[in-house]
Amino acid sequence: MPSKQDPHHSEPSGTRASRSNKPLRPPLPDVDQVVAAAEEALRDGAYVAVGLGVLAFQRAQVRRRQLARELGRRREEVLEQMEGMPFGGPAA
């Protein structure tokens, strides 16, 4: 707090006593509330991570099925083309 001799001090002299009764900082939050909020945030983050993992797995499964379908079609095309070749086609 600036002294009364400070020329830059603009506070009226009567207000200093009324401010001294107020705390300088707000009270600290209850530790249990802070821990509960942190637990909730971590739990929410874990749920989000699991959800994203499930979505990624499902997306990979869809892509795997698409690739299997496409490769099956290409296999059939190749087998059809091989049937007309002089060596008699696939030995199946």
Image (spheres, rainbow, N blue to C red):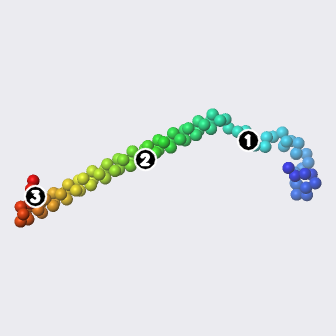
Residue 75, image x and y in percent?
Answer: 18, 57
* Position in image of residue 79 (x %, y %): 13, 59
Q: Amino acid at mark 3?
A: Pro
Q: Nearer the viewer, mark 3 or mark 2?
A: 3
Secondary element at image label 1:
loop
Q: At 91% from the left edge and 45% from the top edge, which residue is drawn?
A: 14
Look at the picture and state if 63 lies above or below 24. Answer: below
Q: Residues within 10 Å of mark 2 (few under 14, many from 20)?
A: few
Q: Earlier in the sequence, mark 3 or mark 2?
A: 2
- In the image, is 6 to the left or to the right of 48? right
Nearer-the-camera pick, 21 or 82: 82
Dot label at residue 81: none
Instruction: State the residue lying farthest toward the top.
Output: 32
**Left or right: 19 in relation to 59:** right
Kindly identify the residue that appears in the image at 91 percent across and 55 percent down.
6
- Residue placed under numbered mark 1 in the picture: 26
Q: Determine whether, in the image, residue 91 is placed left or right of residue 55.
A: left
Callout 2: SS: helix
The residue that mark 3 highlights is: 90
Q: Tell me the CA gap for discs 1 and 2.
A: 39 Å
In depth, the one of 56 and 89 nearer the eye is 89
Q: Is residue 67 left or right of residue 13?
A: left
| Nearer-N-terminus badge (1/3) | 1
Residue at the farthest bottom position: 86
Q: Residues within 10 Å of mark 1 (few under 14, many from 20)?
A: few
Point 15% across, 61% down: residue? 78
- Where 67 falls versus 35 (above or below)? below
Tell me the amino acid under the disc marked 2: Leu
Q: Earlier in the sequence, mark 1 or mark 2?
A: 1
Question: Which mark is on residue 52?
Answer: 2
x, y (%) of residue 5?
A: 93, 54
